[in-house]
Amino acid sequence: MRVLVWMVVVLTCTLAFAHPPVGARPSSAPSQVFLPLIRRPYPHPDLAALAQAAEGLLYPSEIDAPLDPFVPPAYSGLTPSQVCHTLADGAPMRMLDADAFLAAPARAEPWMSPEQRAQAARFATLREVFRQRLANPVACRIGGYQADVFLLGISSTGQIVGLHTVVVET
């Protein structure tokens, strides 16, 4: 009897904590569901330059995730920071310094291997492309310990474009 009660308790707890409430955006799952898929050829020259600079790079965190080109849904008249608030849709959100976010992996340290130094140089190039190509750059972190990070800015065509990645910090 005790075993049966114990199994019911474990099963109930597993089901209760494994699934978020209906309508909630789980902070532990990446937002691939609402991310529009951007394919080549990229619709904006600035997005193409960002995608080329970010190709093959993985942003370091507890998981190493790619930096994917991103164009948010049409939010006419909104600034990049307002787009971040709209994307958060009530989920925990924190604004970050976009330049500092890209500067961290761009630092080459003396102890790094040649491959790690090459990776840091590529991040430095990406950081420079991001600075040169986008106006009003922002970065926002949406979610909990596993979060979506959006690096957004205004392209030369006036549209908001950028990059998306996922970071995990426990």
Image (tube, rainbow, N blue to C red):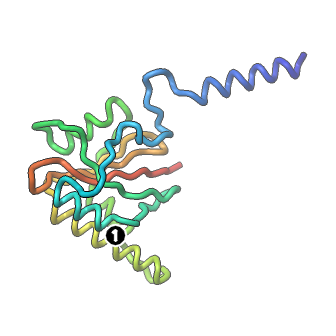
Relative to 32, is 66 above or below?
A: below
Quadrant where the N terminus lies?
top right
Residue that carries the numbered disc 1 in the rendered image: 123
Looking at the image, which is closer to me, 20 or 141?
20
Mark 1: secondary structure: helix
Q: Position of residue 143 (x, y in %)?
A: 41, 40
Relative to 115, is 41 above or below?
A: above
Residue at 39% x, 67% y: name it: 105
- Apparent side of residue 166 relative to residue 36 in the rendered image (left or right): right
Crowding near pointer 1: few (<14 within 10 Å), some, many (20+)? many
Q: Position of residue 7 (x, y in %)?
A: 80, 23
Looking at the image, which is closer to me, 165 or 104?
165
Most extreme residue toward the right is 1
Residue at 45% x, 40% y: name it: 144
- The amino acid sitting under disc 1 is Phe
Q: Position of residue 106 (x, y in %)?
A: 35, 71
